[in-house]
Amino acid sequence: MAPDTSTQIHNIGYRSYDGPRLGRAYARKSLFSQSLRGAYGLGRSAKSKVLPMLLFAVMCVPALIIVAVAIAVPGSTDLPIKYTTYALTTQVIIGLFLASQAPQSVSRDLRFKTVPLYFSRPIERVDYVVAKYAAMASALFVLTATPLLIMWIGALLAKFDFADQTKGFGQGLVSVLLLSLLFAGLGLVMAALTPRRGFGVAAIIAVLLIPFGAVTAVQGISYSTGNTEAIEWMGLFSPITLIDGVQTAFLGATSAFPGGEGPSAGTGVVYLIVALGLIVGSYAALMARYRKAGL
């Protein structure tokens, strides 16, 4: 039997790197890009793409139906749902996306003490936290803003009033931007508390759903007993009702609180301060968590 000569060894010699020396900004950008793509399963296995892409499709389908109905109904002058209402209506889908993707973004790094990228020089803790936070918030913004874009394009195709639709679209974008920053911060903090992905998923779902259920129940009791003043203040204790309160006070949204008892502009300032405080607090908590983890 003739020997196998198909394998060859080529000596290409040692060559030093003579390209540009890229700094921390490029490292942050690379980590951000890799994390954002990973949130939708891009660059990962086919199995990893199924859930995020399915949730993305589920987010967009209602918007397509809304547009189709608005165009099909004769005499329509506006969409059947406000831009600022869409994210509140689909909050369960947003919560499932966050619960499934935030742990995969940080849990494996914590568990194995490594990241799937090579860096020519060590990155700082702030680089890692900023890149991960920005990537998760961007993934949520893409998830929540795309249906609004579909609705806006559909409204223009239906020849609804351009100024009104553009104003509503802009208000909706501001609302989902705040929601994305808030939810991304809370989700990453919960996920970073444990290297176990399953625990992170459960913690994120609990943080989003339990306060919302409790707040909604207490608001319902307050409304039924005539204590309507307490309704607007109770909204401070749940992430999704925080967003509801801010957009009701400042973005012309219709409140989903019982009886439509949304906060006034004065109380809305408190809502905005609490929301921004949670975003900053989440960033500080992530920095503290990774300081403890030795990054």
Image (cartoon, grey):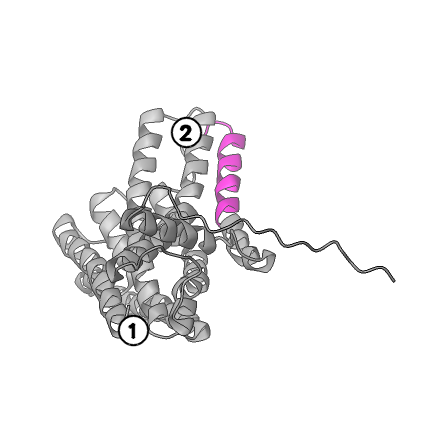
Q: Residue at x 42, y 52 (%)?
A: 34
Gap between marks 2 and 1, in whole Å? 55 Å
Viewed as shown, does residue 88 lie left or right of 291?
right
Q: Position of residue 292 (x, y in %)?
A: 25, 74
Amino acid type of disc 1? Ala
Q: Main secondary structure of the magenta part?
A: helix
Q: Which residues are magenta?
A: 59-77
| Residue 67 lies within the magenta run | yes
* Quadrant that contains the C terminus: bottom left
Kind of element beneath mark 2: loop
44, above or below 83, in the image: below
Q: Relative to the observer, which residue lies in front, 41 or 171?
A: 41
Q: Nearer the viewer, mark 2 or mark 1?
A: 1
Q: Position of residue 20 (x, y in %)?
A: 34, 41
Q: Position of residue 149 (x, y in %)?
A: 42, 37
Whether residue 140 is visible to the viewer of this picture, yes or no, is no
Q: Relative to the observer, which residue lies in front, 226 or 70?
A: 70
Q: Residues within 10 Å of mark 2 (few under 14, many from 20)?
A: some
Label 2, on which residue?
77
Which disc number belongs to residue 160?
none
Q: Position of residue 56 (x, y in %)?
A: 50, 50
Amino acid type of disc 2? Thr
Label 1, on which residue?
293
Kind of element beneath mark 1: helix
